[in-house]
Amino acid sequence: MLSFLKKLKVLAITIFILSAIIISIIYNILNVQKPLPIYQPSQVNAEMVDSTIQYQKKYHKIADFSLINQNGKTITQEDYKGKIYVADFFFTTCQTICPIMTDNMFEIQKIIISDDEVMLLSHTVTPEIDTVAQLKRYAVEKGIIDSKWNLVTGDKKQIYELARKSYLAVKDNGDGGPFDMIHTENFVLIDKERQIRGFYDGTDSEEIERLLDDIKILKASYKD
């Protein structure tokens, strides 16, 4: 009888240990962070996408670009090569959502200031107003750090095509004017392969937290 009880005790301990191991494995599997999606034009609100690519389901990437930043420096895709970055569209004279977006981008800048993997890129939708001098004044006023955050201006057609064909983040004005656009509150997360990995409301503090969390997930994916 005593021998039977000892065997029963050993069996119970074994079952307990195995159960603990199985529960731990299941917990770890369920808590593995899912990779961020890679967005294609067909998955995005058609209002934000140029009609020529609305049905594209794969291979979408940010196109090459050449624009001028707040210091008069030419900024191209090479300046963001091997970087994760957050892009948006704004204009310096905007009095509605832009100040909130800029303040939130500034908060992101503070968090990534020492992170060499992450940068910021803001495109003006009114390049005829937002000259280099105007962007510089705005950058100084808003505390923008040149090494982390470029405000860019340039050819309006190129900015329009980047907004509608690459970042999928701006609405067509619809009034028939060439390359007129209505910017949105979208912040767009771009990976090191120039793919879109997320869209976020740049006026919403909770969305900014989600964006920062997604940057961490994206960074971790390059270490796996």
Image: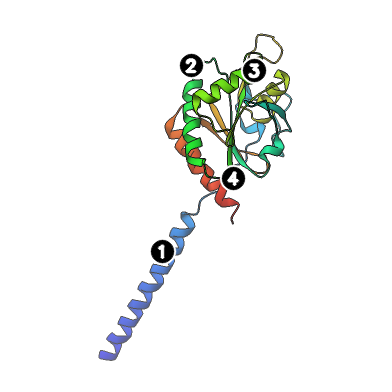
In this rendering, the answer to whether 108 lies above or below 218 is above
* Tags 4 and 2 touching, CB below 8 Å: no
* Residue 117, numbered circle: 4
Depth check, mark 3 against mark 4: the one in front is 3
Q: Residue at coordinates 47% horizontally, 30% vertically from top-left?
A: 104
Q: Which residue is mark 3?
A: 131
The disc, 2 or 3, on the residue closer to the chain's N-terminal end is 2
The disc, 4 or 1, on the residue closer to the chain's N-terminal end is 1
* Tags 2 and 3 touching, CB below 8 Å: no
Q: Which residue is mark 2?
A: 96
Q: Quadrant of the C terminus?
A: bottom right
Q: Which residue is mark 1?
A: 23
- Separation of residues labelled 4 and 2 (CA atoms): 31 Å
Q: Within 10 angstroms of label 4, few (less than 14), some, or many (20 or more) residues?
A: some
Depth check, mark 4 against mark 1: the one in front is 4
Helix, strand or loop at label 3? It is loop
Q: Quadrant of the N terminus?
A: bottom left
In this rendering, the answer to whether 129 lies above or below 54 is above
Helix, strand or loop at label 4? It is loop
Q: Within 10 angstroms of label 2, few (less than 14), some, or many (20 or more) residues?
A: few
* Tags 3 and 4 touching, CB below 8 Å: no
Q: Residue at coordinates 30% horizontally, 88% vertically from top-left?
A: 4
**Dot 2 amino acid type:** Thr
- Separation of residues labelled 2 and 3 (CA atoms): 20 Å
